[in-house]
Each structure stands twice: as C-alpha cells, then as structure tokens.
Image: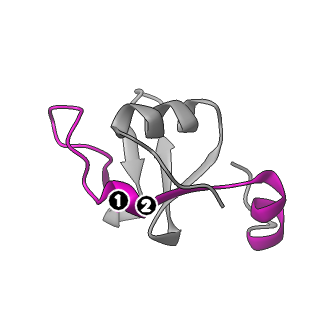
Amino acid sequence: MRKGFSNAREIMAAVDRREAVYWTSLRYPVHKDHLGQYFIGEGPGMIGLTWADGVTLNGRLEDFFVLTGEEHSTLCPNIVH
C-alpha cells in the first residue's frame, strides 16, 4: 500500500493512470465518471472527491491510499479497476 499524496491533483492523476485509489478503506474507491468528475465511494452514497473549487478535498489527504496490483488482486479478486 502506498500513501503520500500531496494534493488532490496527485490523487486525480493516480486515478487517471488506473491505479486502485481508496479513501479510508476498501469500501470507498476513488473513481472518475464518464463526464470526467472524480468521486469517492459508489452508489447513492458517493461524494465528490473535491469541493466545487476542484482543490479542497472531501476527506483528509492522509486517508487516501493506493493498492499495488498484487494487493488489489489479493484483496479484491472480483473487482477490475
């Protein structure tokens, strides 16, 4: 597991590289929709990654992490990221 993002743009770049980015736990994947908007979570409870300013995160920066390919395969075998 890798942590250490410096800002929202780094998180967005990791998502764009199709890295498995999560917030606080595996229950909250960070993803981008077909309109190019970034979200935390899935389904009706998901929230935007940032406020409307595109910079201020909806979550603490230190709570975001990336799983390596091997970690993701082991922990989430049925999820394609």
In the depicted view, which residue is nearer to us: 8 or 46?
Answer: 8
Q: CA distance from mark 2 to mark 1?
A: 4 Å
The quadrant in which residue 2 appears is: bottom right
Q: Is residue 20 above or below residue 55?
A: below
Contact? badges 2 and 1 (CB < 8 Å)? yes
Task: Give left or right: position of 13 versus 66.
Answer: left
Q: Secondary structure under badge 2?
A: loop
Say if residue 24 shows up in the picture: yes
Badge 2 or badge 1: first in the primary sequence: 2
The residue nearer to you, when weighing 51 against 44, is 51
Across and down, in percent, residue 55 comes to 23, 35
Q: Secondary structure at mark 1?
A: loop
Residue found 39% across the figure and 39% down from its top: 38
Q: Pick whichever, 42 or 14, lies toward us.
A: 14
Q: Is residue 36 left or right of residue 22?
A: left
Q: Residues within 10 Å of mark 2 (few under 14, many from 20)?
A: some
Q: Residues within 10 Å of mark 1 (few under 14, many from 20)?
A: few
The residue that appears at 35% across and 39% down in the rendered structure is 7
Magenta stretch in the rendered image: 46-75
Name the amino acid type tagged 1: Met
Tag on residue 41?
2
Percent x, y of residue 28 = 47, 65
Looking at the image, which residue is at 65% across and 43% down? 19
Residue identified by numbered label 1: 46
Residue 47 included in the magenta stretch of the image: yes
Q: Name the amino acid type tagged 2.
A: Gly
Q: Residue at x 44, y 69 (%)?
A: 24
How far across and down, in percent of the image, does residue 41 sit? Answer: 43, 60
Residue 50 screen position, x and y as percent: 25, 43
The quadrant of the picture occupied by the N terminus is: bottom right
